[in-house]
Image: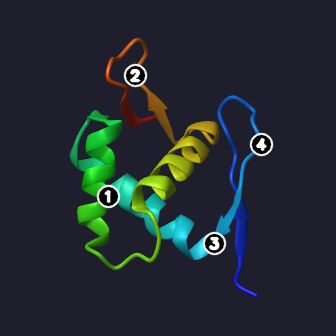
């Protein structure tokens, strides 16, 4: 059985169990994008991660970006820019 990770949620909602391998791929892509761009909208983050993984990802990139982004927020690695509309995210 492949390794799984239980994701966290910044609002203490229940996380989900996902493949550790997929988690790491998306997490690393999010970090790469945020190191290049100081702040980015969530929609553009999803698009940039899609380009970063370059079609070499099995599953819905947008779903995984949402899930991993929330987990990274809960762990204090990234944060939302307060009062931003649309939502902006950046490295913590």
Residue located beneath label 1 in the image? 49
Q: Where residue 5 appears, x then y in whole percent?
A: 71, 64
Q: Where residue 1 appears, x then y in whole percent?
A: 76, 88
- Using the image, tell me which numbered label, if any, was put on residue 14: 4
- Using the image, tell me which numbered label, if any, was put on residue 19: 3
Query: In percent of the image, x 54 and y 52: which residue is there?
Result: 68
Q: How far apart are the two marked residues, 1 and 4, measured between alpha carbons?
A: 24 Å
Q: Where residue 22 appears, x then y in whole percent?
A: 53, 71
Q: Which residue is at the far bottom?
A: 1
Say which element carries label 2. loop
Q: Is residue 84 left or right of residue 75?
A: left
Say which element carries label 3. strand
| Relative vertical location of residue 11 with respect to residue 70 in this rendering, above or below | above
- Which numbered disc flags the more N-terminal residue, 1 or 4? 4
Viewer-nearest of labels 4 and 2? 4
Say which element carries label 4. loop
Quick one: label 3, few (<14), some, or many (20+) residues within 10 Å? few
- Which numbered disc flags the more N-terminal residue, 4 or 3? 4
Q: Are marks 1 and 4 in contact (CB under 8 Å)?
A: no
Q: Which residue is at the far top?
A: 83
| Relative vertical location of residue 11 with respect to residue 22 in this rendering, above or below | above
Say which element carries label 1. helix
């Amino acid at each position: 059985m492949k390794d799984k990770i239980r994701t966290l949620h910044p609002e203490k909602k229940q996380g989900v169990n996902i493949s550790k391998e997929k988690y790491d791929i998306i997490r690393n892509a999010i970090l790469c994008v945020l190191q290049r761009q100081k702040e980015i909208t969530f929609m553009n983050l999803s698009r940039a991660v899609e380009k970063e993984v370059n079609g070499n990802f099995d599953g819905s990139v947008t779903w995984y970006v949402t899930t991993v982004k929330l987990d990274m927020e809960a762990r204090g690695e990234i944060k939302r820019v307060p009062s931003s509309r649309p939502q902006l995210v950046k490295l913590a």
